[in-house]
Image (spheres, rainbow, N blue to C red):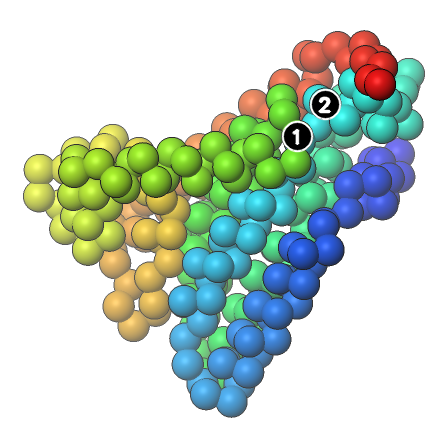
Amino acid sequence: MTWFIIRFFVFVVPPPLGLAIGWVTLLGIGTWWGLEKGLSTTGLLSGCLYLQMLGVSAGFMQAARAGYFDEALGVGRRRWATAVAHWLAVSWPGLLVWLLLGCVEAFGKGGEATSLRPSSLAALFWVSTAAWLLSLPFGRWSGALLWTSALILFGGSTWGGDLLSEVGGGGTGSTSFAMAVGTIGISPFLMLTPVETAVARADAMSLVILTLSVVALLAGVGVVHCQDYPLEFRR
């Protein structure tokens, strides 16, 4: 039954054409960059992370109340399985491209890939779950728009800009552990450090970010499970 629901969401909630073109373009550039040049794909991973933020921001409740997900939410369906299937269906393109970029970099450089480091995988998992959770009550792109707005406001403030610079540079200073986790939570791009210049603090944060990602995924499952979805007819 779970595989049926996954296939259902893959066909009902496909990635928009522009996003699919973005994934293919990014993968093509990354392949050329990694194989021909033998360079790190760290810069491309930031773009990949943002595309993933857009991809998982598919929304859920509005479409469910419009009747588009009736087959997945019907009598006898396990809500938790429906929620996990929806997350997998909207996140798999980004996860696949990320892993392929990692394989290309590892092959081209003959060593460890930036995208496959614990801190980078933690950043990917966090974005995939947190942006999905933010978009559940709304429609397509909502989670990414909310996150982008928060990042702009945070980075545009003097206090937030100082935190981004300090945490991104690997310094400790007067920044507490909780503040550093919050800064990385808002800007997970700070976790994407090249293998050669890996910031030790990013690795130390990986377990915390992964834990928060699991919490976000479970919270999303709980939201889908506990909600009612009465049909809303729109003209």
Q: Is any part of residue 208 visible from this angle?
A: no
Label 2 close to label 1 by CB (< 8 Å): yes
In this rendering, position of residue 119 left or right of residue 30: left
Q: CA distance from mark 2 to mark 1?
A: 6 Å
Does residue 58 appear in the picture of this structure?
Answer: yes
Task: Identify which amino acid the numbered label 2 is placed on.
Answer: Gln
Residue 139: numbered disc: 1
Question: Could you say whether the residue bearing mark 1 is in a helix, strand or loop?
Answer: loop
Residue at screen point 53% across, 68% down: 102
Label ID, residue 62: 2
Helix, strand or loop under label 2: helix
The quarter of the picture where the C terminus appears is: top right
Residue 151's place in the image compared with 93, above or below, is: above
Measured as percent of width and height from the top left, residue 106 is found at 49, 76
Residue closest to the eye, 128 or 232: 232
Considering every residue shown, the one lying at the far left of the view is 173
Observer-nearest of 211 and 43: 43
- In this image, 201 relative to 123: left or right? left
Q: Position of residue 46 (x, y in %)?
A: 44, 58
Picture coordinates of residue 213, whole percent (x, y): 49, 36
Q: Dividing the picture into quarters, in which one does residue 136 lie?
A: top right
- The answer to whether residue 35 is above or below residue 191 is below
Residue found 65% across the figure and 36% down from its top: 140
Residue that lies at the very extreme toward the bottom in this rendered image = 36
How busy is the neighbourhood of tag 2: few (under 14 within 10 Å), some, or many (20 plus)? Answer: some
Q: Position of residue 58 (x, y in %)?
A: 66, 37
